[in-house]
Image: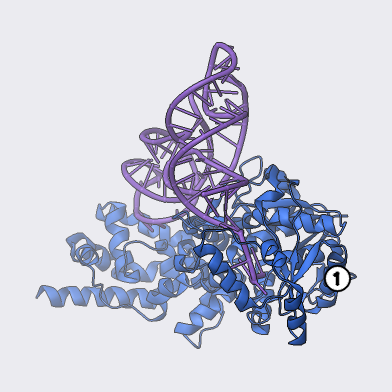
Amino acid sequence: MIRVRYAPSPTGEIHVGNARTALFNYLFARHNKGTFILRLDDTDKKRSTDQAIRSMVEDITWFGIDWDEGYLKGGDYGPYSQSERMDLYNHYTDILLKEGSAYELHYTDEEIKNIKEQYEKSMKTFSYRKVKELEGEARVREFKEKGLTPAVVFKVLEDKEIVVDDIVRGDVHFNSNEFKDFVIRRSNGIPVYNYATVIDDALMNITHVIRAEEHLSNTPKQILIFDALKFPHPYFAHISLIFAPDRTKLSKRHGATSIGDFRRMGFLPEAMFNFLALLGWSPKDGREFFTKEELIELFTLESVNKAPAIFDISKLKWMNHKYIVELGKEILCTLAMPYLKEAYPDIKCDEKTLLLVDTLRGNMNVLPDIVKLSEPFLTGLGFPEGEEEKNILFDKDSIKVFKYILENIENIEFKEQKINEFLDGLKEKLGLSGKKIYHPLRVALFGSKSGPELWKIFILLGKEEVVQRIKFVLEQIKKTSN
RNA sequence: GGCGUAGUAGAACAACGGUGAGUUCGGGGGGCUCUCAAUCCCCAGACCAGGGUUCAACUCCCUGCUACGCUACCA
């Protein structure tokens, strides 16, 4: 039975990199009919807030990931928050201490800092081992008398070959001489991440650890702990990092980085899900659009790419656009509502709004685009400001078109086909190219020469409004010409 | 500094010890007797560098370069 986990530390919003890690874990679990566990790495109590936990759960749920076991769900391997597992960590720390795989260090945080500095100044390499050797019994006694707790340091075996058998990277070799002893429990009694995570993964029977590449270098240390405690170690899969277009780690200064950011910007979860799945992974056949079910079906860790993936927001927008176009109009309208309400508090998803949304969707990349696009329909239209638009309106031929329409509009039935037939007929009747007809009309009715198809604009506006806008434009032209 | 990982067009991916190095986004141009969009067609653009191994290397090996990560009583 395959068991994987996503273990965020709830110190802020979910970064897209973490979301992608969660996604790969999720896809892997579902593909293999395994169990997906949500665990909270909240040992850092100061930075982990209830608010952050809530928003994390909200975001990950919005994103489309659900879990079988863990936080809020429970299960046989709880508790699922590290902050509630201190007894467990202490238990195993005691074992390590007893077996001599770890030792206590009787120095305060301050003292260690000073010693490190001294080593640095004299160009010597610092190690806990050396400090320990100089510790002396007096110091231990004094430490105890003062009621201070020692830090616990893990003793790294010498000259040990460690191979991380990584599913995406193959065998990665390390030698234990490359690293020095390291702290596993701080003097404040709280275990260090690298240690707690090993205990948790072992106790929760995690079979595959799928996580970001930045953890690869720490993996040999973790393996040493697994071995010292005689835990079997899981398979590892280190997936590449997500970079910004400047090839550095995607961070706040690049703008939107968290799932919450993208949600607020009006991206659809399905698009996000699809897009992130394709960051560092691709199916054999090179397809780009997948439902969640298809991704579950196709996903394998073996086809995960080793190179860092670059987050290209323009591709995300393109993909989001595709998803918006495919959405049912009722759903699209509901999703767009919050943005529309900001500009028009009284708006509802009634027939008119549905038509509006349905008409404009083809020009939307993200949900809030609807606000700008619908302006000509909801707040009316003044005379265009732009030079290009003005030039189009002032064209002699344009005036001919406007006049002809005003004379004949009574006879047009406001249906797609009828309107198009009528507009098409104009070319012959007036001897004008399509451009000469469509451009001025769109400017007069919509304010710009590009936008939705004209027949849609006609229907959306209704006969009366079409007449009024054309009349208005004609008046303005007359005024300016005189 | 040590260790690790990666390096195919601007971006995401693909294939292959012998190719015309393929697909998608983006860029440029054109068709679709209106724009944007969609769609179709065309164009530009890539195997990080240097050595080896081999009849043959983008592909295997080594070195270098570059980027990133780890090297914390951060996670």
Chain A, colour shown = blue
Where does label 1 land, which residue? A94
Task: Give the image location of residue A454, x and y in percent.
Answer: 39, 63
Chain B, colour shown = purple
Q: Nearer the viewer, residue A55 or A293?
A: A55
The answer to whether residue A297 is left or right of residue A475 is right
What is the crowding at mark 1: few (fewer than 14 residues within 10 Å), some, or many (at least 20)? some
Q: Is residue A464 above or below residue A286?
A: below
Task: Give the image location of residue A409, x and y in percent.
Answer: 35, 69
Q: Residue at x 50, y 60 (%)?
A: A317
The answer to whether residue A137 is left or right of residue A422 is right
Q: Quadrant of the C terminus of chain A?
A: bottom left
Q: Residue at x 57, y 67 (%)?
A: A116
Name the chain letter of the residue that bears numbered label 1. Answer: A
Residue A93 in view, yes or no:
yes
- Residue A42, by quadrant, is bottom right
The answer to whether residue A116 is left or right of residue A224 is left
Q: Quadrant of the N terminus of chain A?
A: bottom right
Q: Nearer the viewer, residue A373 or A161?
A: A161
Q: Is residue A419 above or below residue B74?
A: above
Task: Give the image location of residue A228, x and y in percent.
Answer: 83, 57
Task: Give the image location of residue A439, x and y in percent.
Answer: 30, 60
Q: Nearer the viewer, residue A357 or A245?
A: A245
Label 1: state its secondary structure. Answer: helix
What residue type is disc 1 on? Asp
